[in-house]
Image (cartoon, rainbow, N blue to C red):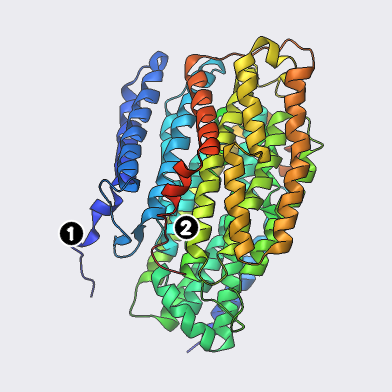
């Protein structure tokens, strides 16, 4: 009854960047057992090596030197290797490299230097990469769990500190709850279309639109429930409640990584499911896809709530948590734009540009928080920034750059990201949402620039600990933020090649 | 034969029971059990859709197997977290976890 596929049918070559990382991580898991407790930095170096190999392969593929699949499918359509996959791989791996660098000394001085940290971080990265390459709803689900479960553990990594344990518990309970919605949605989509393959769903949607109402309802509810599950991962507004608590309680090095990685994975999967899987899910002829209205409404709510609540925050980690909610709103705007006919590729490019800019900026901002944080996780208030410009001028300058980039001031990467997101949304005629986006960006300047004010114009001791790996991470993030802002064509030329394998 | 919609109603009822449990129960273990109920509802849906719509194609069944495995992995991590918290506070009541609020 079942045919066993031969090895060549699987097309493993197309999956090389992520497969090498998964293999490397499994080896690291074993190798870590033989690393003595007092030399756990070795594990970090091995993790960097594994990430480096995978990043080199992804960059070669993205830079067109050797293509690992050009819209090719591997594992019988479960895995799609196209330029979007490569772009997501690069963003995920750069974030992971920065994540290892910021953790290197932080774990040691907080007494949590355990080898499994790096293993879990690499597994999460593999989850993000699989989400970007998902060609099947099964892969979306399993990759989401591969992304989430290690993050639950990492949030509680500062055991026995109570805040860390509590944040892990909250993240776990709400995360598992949300993935329940996601799979229920997938089951309904499976019921409506009779398949879990995104390419087959793409084909089946045309029949459903022309066919009976029952399947349409099933598909509509299914897509809505998937939006709930993925919206939770990216911290979109009705499902954002976990974000500030988890970001505040979890170890800062974990937050620096996961604030970007979980979002990249979530948005990649949203694009795969909505923009590539069901762009033709149009209920009234000539209208945009049926899911577009919901997505832009969620985007508007997310931008408003994230930016408004961030104003009253006095803890840096909480403030950046609300800021990350707000940024999820801007990216959702681009996802919504993908619902208009012919805009899928432009939206995917906007999402990639925004996430790349956001990766450098946000990891950078959290790295500065790591530098000022004390060993017992205190001193993360906004006031801890006082006097930083005098005692650590370079650190303060980097933080000021990250804050300007998060606001979206020209000549920083954040501006380039917002520009393309708004451009995609305007092409899709989402004018109201764009106006809300512009106004909330203006509001966000208040709380971002307040931090700059504290650094430059108020007196304080401005203590900070900057060991060299952290300094290197901050420098890379700052250089990335500045370069992508001053020379946006570095990013946009690359992004112009990005297409989703099917859809549109 | 029992019609498909009956299975879907049972699954929806089970999912709603789980949903209610997550929202109403205070004990973290009970919340975890309710989440498992929600995932089981999904399995009923998947297998019913498979049996009635595409009995020749195994993808629905295989998906149900994936859901088991992931649910088991989630339960393992979740119970470990709950034990870690219990050791420190002698409590697994979700409302007691209130160190952080806005």
- Residue A387 visible? The answer is yes
Kindly indicate the quadrant of the structure image that contains residue A322.
top right
In x, y percent, where is residue A34? Answer: 31, 22
Vertical relation: A107 (above or below) B47: above
User: What residue sits 42% from the left and 77% below the top?
Assistant: A203
Mark sitting earlier along the chain (2/1): 1
Position of the N terminus of chain A, as image quadrant, is bottom left
Residue at numbered disc 1: A8
Q: Secondary structure at mark 1?
A: helix
User: What residue sits 59% from the left and 84% below the top?
Assistant: A285
In x, y percent, where is residue A355? Answer: 53, 45
User: What residue sits 21% from the left and 70% below the top?
Assistant: A3
Q: Nearer the viewer, mark 2 or mark 1?
A: 1
- For disc 2, the chain is A
Tell me: A56 left or right of A391. Answer: left
Vertical relation: A299 (above or below) A4: above
Give the camera-side residue of A348 and B31: A348
Tell me: A460 left or right of A393. Answer: right
In x, y percent, where is residue A31? Answer: 31, 27
Residue at numbered disc 2: A141
- Distance between the Cα atoms at labels 2 and 1? 26 Å
Tell me: B57 left or right of A158. Answer: left
């Amino acid at each position: 009854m079942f045919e066993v596929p031969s090895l060549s049918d699987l097309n493993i070559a197309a999956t090389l960047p992520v497969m090498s990382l998964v293999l490397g991580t499994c080896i690291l898991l074993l190798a870590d057992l033989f690393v003595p407790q007092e030399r756990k930095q070795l594990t970090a170096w091995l993790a960097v090596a594994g990430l480096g190999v995978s990043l080199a392969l992804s960059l070669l593929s993205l830079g067109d030197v050797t293509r690992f699949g050009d819209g090719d499918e591997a594992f019988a359509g479960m895995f799609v290797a196209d330029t979007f996959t490569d772009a997501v791989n690069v963003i995920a791996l750069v974030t992971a490299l920065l994540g290892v660098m910021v953790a290197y000394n932080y774990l040691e001085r907080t007494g949590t230097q355990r080898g499994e940290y790096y293993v879990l971080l690499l597994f999460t990265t593999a989850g993000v990469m699989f989400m970007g390459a998902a060609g099947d709803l099964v892969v979306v689900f399993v990759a989401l769990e591969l992304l989430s479960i290690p993050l639950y553990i990492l949030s509680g990594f500062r055991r026995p500190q109570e805040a860390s344990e509590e944040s892990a518990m909250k993240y776990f309970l709400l995360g598992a709850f949300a993935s329940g919605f996601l799979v229920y949605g997938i089951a309904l989509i499976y019921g409506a279309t009779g398949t879990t393959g995104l390419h087959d769903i793409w084909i089946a949607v045309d029949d459903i639109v022309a066919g009976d109402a029952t399947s349409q309802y099933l598909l509509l509810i299914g897509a809505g429930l998937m939006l709930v599950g993925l919206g939770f991962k990216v911290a979109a507004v009705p499902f954002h409640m976990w974000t500030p608590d988890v970001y505040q309680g979890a170890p800062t090095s974990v937050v620096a990584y996961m604030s970007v990685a979980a979002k990249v994975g979530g948005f990649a999967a949203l694009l795969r499911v909505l923009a590539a899987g069901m762009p033709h899910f149009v209920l009234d002829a000539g209208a945009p896809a049926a899911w577009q209205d919901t997505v832009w409404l969620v985007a508007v709510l997310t931008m408003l709530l994230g930016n408004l609540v961030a104003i009253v925050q006095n803890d840096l980690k909480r403030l950046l948590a609300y800021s990350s909610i707000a940024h999820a709103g801007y990216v959702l705007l681009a996802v919504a734009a993908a619902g208009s006919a012919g805009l899928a590729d432009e939206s995917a490019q906007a999402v990639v540009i925004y996430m790349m800019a956001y990766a450098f900026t946000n990891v950078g901002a959290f790295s500065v928080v790591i530098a000022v944080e004390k060993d017992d996780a205190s001193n993360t208030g906004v006031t801890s920034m006082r006097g930083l410009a005098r005692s650590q001028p370079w650190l303060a300058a980097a933080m000021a750059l990250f804050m300007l980039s998060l606001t979206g001031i020209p000549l920083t990467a954040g501006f380039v990201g917002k520009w393309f997101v708004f451009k995609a949304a305007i092409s899709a005629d989402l004018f109201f949402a764009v106006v809300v986006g512009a106004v909330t960006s203006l509001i966000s300047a208040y709380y971002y620039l307040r931090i700059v004010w504290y650094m430059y114009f108020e007196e304080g001791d401005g203590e900070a600990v900057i060991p060299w790996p952290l300094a290197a991470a901050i420098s890379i993030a700052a250089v990335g933020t500045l370069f992508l802002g001053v020379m946006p064509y570095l990013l946009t030329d690359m992004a112009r090649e990005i297409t989703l394998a099917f859809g549109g | 034969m029992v019609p498909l919609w009956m299975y879907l109603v049972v699954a929806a009822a089970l999912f709603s029971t789980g949903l209610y449990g997550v929202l109403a129960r205070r004990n973290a273990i009970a919340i975890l059990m309710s989440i498992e109920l929600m995932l089981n509802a999904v399995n009923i849906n998947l297998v019913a859709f498979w049996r009635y719509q595409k009995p020749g194609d195994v993808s629905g069944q295989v998906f149900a197997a994936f859901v088991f495995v992931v649910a088991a992995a989630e339960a393992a991590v979740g119970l470990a977290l709950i034990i870690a918290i219990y050791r420190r506070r002698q409590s697994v009541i979700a409302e007691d976890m209130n160190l952080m609020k806005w």
